[in-house]
């Protein structure tokens, strides 16, 4: 993912009683790559200075002059096609194609926060000129119990359950993994790191392109299975890679697995 050092990545210490202030990221990352998608973004929700009393903030956007298609994420760029990113206080949450989505406030401190919406190409390069942002106030009626560090008996690891090495796939397939000594959490996407927590990214062919290898990221998951679309992948032999990531989407966990399959 081509993001500024302030937007993703390896946060410095800044927690408030175990809760992140979420505006903390500083990392020695390569310069961000940008793209001009031609997209026009209008934020429908939340409205400016809304007070959020629940434990998720509901977001909604209108994006015109741009076709949203997450099935093509991580594949070759196509003009006028892509997805959009949501950031909470300049920290990436995820990519989206639905125009409405809730953002969990787990491990987020009460107070003023900002959501940013950025159109992005298939390789996750962002259209900074089209960025829109909105501020809101988080004042939960019943705050969530924060996620706290976990201890496991061994090092985190991930293995691929399916497809099997040498399999032939067509149209799409379920990429199924098993993570050990690690707790997968979607609610902590983009939040400060908490020991023992994170998620996994599915990449195709390489982990070397773009910011921390995200140029070929097909998607991210906190479930055991991620459905891979082959819409943007050419027939032939390919490697599909599962990488454990920390909450800031950095591969600091040091665990990954790969499988070679033939796309028909």
Image (tube, helix red, strand yellow):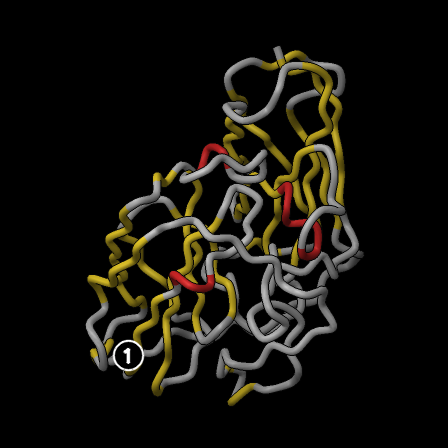
Q: In this view of the protein, can residue 197 be seen by the observer?
A: no
Q: Residues within 10 Å of mark 1 (few under 14, many from 20)?
A: some
Q: Quadrant of residue 9?
A: bottom right
Is 130 drawn above or below residue 28 in the view shown?
A: above
Q: Quadrant of the N terminus?
A: bottom right
Q: Nearer the viewer, residue 26 or 104?
A: 26
Q: Position of residue 227 (x, y in %)?
A: 50, 31
- At x 70% / y 56%, what residue is drawn? 212
How many marks are shown on the rendered structure? 1
Q: Is residue 36 left or right of residue 9?
A: left
Q: Quadrant of residue 251?
A: bottom right
Q: Is residue 60 left or right of residue 204?
A: left
Q: Quadrant of the C terminus?
A: top right
Q: Position of residue 238 (x, y in %)?
A: 71, 24
Residue position marked by numbered label 1 in the rendering: 136
Is 142 drawn above or below residue 264 in the view shown?
A: below
Q: Nearer the viewer, residue 61 or 184?
A: 61
Q: Position of residue 79 (x, y in %)?
A: 46, 37
- At x 46% / y 33%, what residue is drawn? 71
Q: In this view of the protein, can residue 152 be seen by the observer?
A: yes
SS label for mark 1: strand
- At x 65% / y 12%, what residue is drawn? 168
- At x 74% / y 72%, what residue is drawn? 28
Q: Quadrant of residue 123?
A: top right
Is 113 drawn above or below residue 2 in the view shown?
A: below
Q: Nearer the viewer, residue 254 or 118?
A: 118
Q: Position of residue 60 (x, y in %)?
A: 25, 57
Is 98 drawn above or below residue 193 in the view shown?
A: above
Q: Nearer the viewer, residue 181 or 92?
A: 92
């Amino acid at each position: 993912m081509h993001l500024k050092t302030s937007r993703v990545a390896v946060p410095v210490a800044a927690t408030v009683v175990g809760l992140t202030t979420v505006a903390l990221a500083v990392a020695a990352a390569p310069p961000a790559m940008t793209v001009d998608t031609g997209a026009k973004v209008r934020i429908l929700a939340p409205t400016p200075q809304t007070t959020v009393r629940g434990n998720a903030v509901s977001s909604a956007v209108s994006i015109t002059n741009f076709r949203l298609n997450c099935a093509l994420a991580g594949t070759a760029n196509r003009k006028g096609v892509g997805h959009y990113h949501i950031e909470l206080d300049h920290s990436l949450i995820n990519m989206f194609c639905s125009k409405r989505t809730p953002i969990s406030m787990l491990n987020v401190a009460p107070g003023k926060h900002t959501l940013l919406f950025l159109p992005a190409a298939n390789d996750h390069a962002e259209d900074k000129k089209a960025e829109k942002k909105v501020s809101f106030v988080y004042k939960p009626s019943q705050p969530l119990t924060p996620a706290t560090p976990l201890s496991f008996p061994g090092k985190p690891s991930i293995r691929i359950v399916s497809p099997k090495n040498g399999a032939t796939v067509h149209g799409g397939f379920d990429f199924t993994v098993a993570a050990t000594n690690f707790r997968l959490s979607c609610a902590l996407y983009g939040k400060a790191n908490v020991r023992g927590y994170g998620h996994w990214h599915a990449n195709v062919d390489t982990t070397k392109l773009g910011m921390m290898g995200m140029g070929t990221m097909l998607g991210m998951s906190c479930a055991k299975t991620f459905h891979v679309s082959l819409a943007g992948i050419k027939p032939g032999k390919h490697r599909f890679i599962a990488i454990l990531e920390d909450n800031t989407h950095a591969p600091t966990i040091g665990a990954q697995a790969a499988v070679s399959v033939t796309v028909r």
